[in-house]
Image: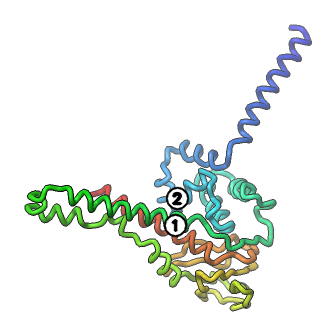
Amino acid sequence: MSESQGDKLNTAQQAESADANEAEIVKTMGERLREAREAKSLQLRDVARETRQSQDTLASLEEMETEHIPDSILRLQARNYARFLGLPEEEVASAYAANRGATNASAMPVEVEGKSVPTRMILVAAASVFAIGVVGTGVSLLLQPATEQSTDQLAISARLAPNTVQEIDFAALRADAGQEFSLRAKESAWIEVRGSDGTVFRSRNMSAGETYFPRTGAGWTITVRDAGAFEWRLGDDVYAAVGEDEQALYSLSVDNVLDAAVAAQSAALADAAASSEQRR
């Protein structure tokens, strides 16, 4: 083989290698997560059960549709999923931060403005679906023969009973969650709580185990120097840590976190109800 032919062959091989590398580069982190999950022959519900994450959250991570998840929560969710799949946690978390336009995944301060999240639209859509389902059920009952309805009272009761999934009152769920939504200090650490007009309601160290109930639906924000020292709670249940250890967060929207918590809770209730229906 002549030297010129060898050079051409090397050039072709380098071009193929570059094309392969380029294809790997354009692959999103969500696609990498999905491929890693599928390589383990796991469904999203399997991962959700093992990691105790919402199936909807895991799906959002794989689809790279995470605009409704607060920055600090997104980072924790991404790291947790990556850890379960055996992928580099920091690389995965940084990819989601970069996708959102952050210059540094661990930059301080991290400012989160009170931007309305798509969760509300999801709740409105769910309510619309529920209304359509109710109307459809009523029409189907009216079209049933009268003799059948009069002779099988048990069947009538079964048709009239609303589905467990449809019984979920999303508006009431958010209202109840707002009353039980709290911040708990896992260790002694400083926190500042501000109202939408800048009024400071708290600016001091909270003791380990101390709980604070911020006002919801009012545009309140919190600022912490060590996000890992605090956790969000819904009643007696821990929803998520505020952030990572020694991570400073500024102006984190209480309402945004509550919306994400309610969305996760309602998704978990719907999944549980669907599983119950399948077992019947």
Res 91 quadrant in image: bottom right
Quarter of the image that includes the C terminus: bottom left
Q: What element carries label 2?
A: helix
Q: Which amino acid does label 2 sit on?
A: Asp
Counting residues from the start of the chain, the first of labels 1 and 2 encountered is 2
Q: Nearer the viewer, residue 242 or 132?
A: 132
Determine which of the numbered discs, if any, sits on residue 56 in the image: 2
Report x, y in % for residue 164.
33, 66
| 203 up-or-down from 117: above or below | below
Q: Which residue is labeled 1 in the image?
A: 264
Q: Which amino acid does label 1 sit on?
A: Ala
Q: Which residue lies furthest to the top in this view?
A: 1
Res 2 quadrant in image: top right
| 185 up-or-down from 27: above or below | below
Relative placement, left or right, of 49 versus 106 is left
Colour mapping: rainbow
- Residue drawn at point x = 80 percent, y = 70 percent: 108
| 31 up-or-down from 58: above or below | above
Report x, y in % for residue 264.
51, 66
Q: Nearer the viewer, residue 164 or 223?
A: 164
